[in-house]
Amino acid sequence: MAAVQLGQYAPAEKILVHVSDTHFLGDGAALYGAVDTDQTVHRAFEQLHRSGIRPDAFILTGDVADRGEADAYRRIRGIVEAAAAQWGAAIVWVMGNHDQREPFRTELLGETQSGGVGEPVDQAPVDQVHDLDGLRIIVLDTSVPGYHHGEITDAQLEWLRAVLSTPSPRGSILALHHPPIPTPLPLMSVLELQDQPRLAAVLVGSDVRAILGGHLHYSTQGLFAGIPVSVAAATCYTMDLGAPDRELTGVNGAQTLNLVHVYTDQITHSQLPIGEFVAVTHFPAAYVDQLAVLTPEGRREAFSRQQ
């Protein structure tokens, strides 16, 4: 059923599902011996299916696999492709610090060896551009092989500058793993994106409307170079921001994914908690249908007036 406009804003032009830090292990092993990473992702996509939301794309902002194992990449690819196929949605994969470039390219992107038999797959940063009917998704690989902090090379910045030199009809969204915003967790600050002013200099004045990131394992928002930044919490485990000062504690709970609604003049970012919860109030879809046939004044009288 077509979306009904009950307020001032028309329905979103694009809906993106922002997933991060799935951290799959080979052979379906539990992360830290405690977290069933596959089950959480399955549950999240089942909730999406029940909701009736029709996403245009799935964007996974890194740490897709915990150790870069080929089997882990094949499993998450199978789950995401099956979900995306239900809606004909695009899939955008982003490298994280736990990912390994060679299996990432072969297992997720379907790339073959760059040369003859025995020659390695391209080990260069996995930077990409995707077009969603004029909405440009730019993928920037901030991973540093052998380390967990983030960096962007001079060559990558020049590439990004060249891409942004031509605006896209619906603007651009930048997707990377290490978000360019502060974190209140001291140890995570060590693993932040380095030399952020260099990236800001490229983004200022561009058509980038939002920056999507992961890495932190909790949902947060900020502003970078005048651009809104939205971080999706991990689907595997989340950081406890209420842990004792200066401690870093991951917990098996509070997992979410983000819904990104792209409108003509703005973008919203919403958190979708993963799991089953007790409903305490409920208005059925039939009630929305009743309001849809009323005038704006009638809707306010029916739903806004205090009883």
Image: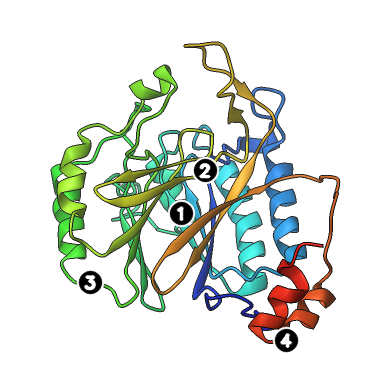
Quarter of the image with the N terminus in it: bottom right
Tag 1 near tag 2, CB within 8 Å: yes
Indicate the secondary structure of the residue bearing disc 1: strand
Q: Are marks 4 and 2 in contact (CB under 8 Å)?
A: no
The image shows residue 25 at horizontal and vertical percentages of: 61, 35
Q: Residue at x 73, y 86 (%)?
A: 294
Residue 93: mark: 1
Q: Are marks 2 and 3 in contact (CB under 8 Å)?
A: no
Residue closer to the observer: 261 or 24? 261
Quick one: SS at disc 2? loop
Q: Which residue type does callout 2 highlight?
A: Val
Q: Nearer the viewer, residue 50 or 295?
A: 295
Mark 1, mark 4: which one is toward the viewer?
A: 4
Label 4 to label 3: alpha-carbon separation? 40 Å
Could you tell me residue 41's position as x and y percent? 67, 47
Dot placed on the residue nearer the N-terminal end, 4 or 3: 3
Q: Which mark is residue 64?
A: 2
Q: Residue drawn 70% across and 51% down?
A: 44
Q: Which mark is residue 294?
A: 4
User: Distance from label 1 to label 3 (Cα)?
Assistant: 22 Å
State the separation of the CA atoms marked 1 and 2: 8 Å
Label 1 neighbourhood size at 10 Å, few (<14), some (14-19), many (20+)? many
Secondary structure beneath dot 4 equals loop
Mark 4 to mark 2 CA distance (whole Å): 47 Å
For label 3, count other residues whose C-alpha is less than 10 Å away and answer few (under 14), some (14-19) or many (20+). some
Q: Would you say 299 lies left or right of 155 here?
A: right
- The nearer-to-camera label among 2 and 3 is 3
Question: Toward which corner of the image does residue 83 lie, by quadrant?
Answer: bottom right
Q: Mark 3 = which residue?
A: 167
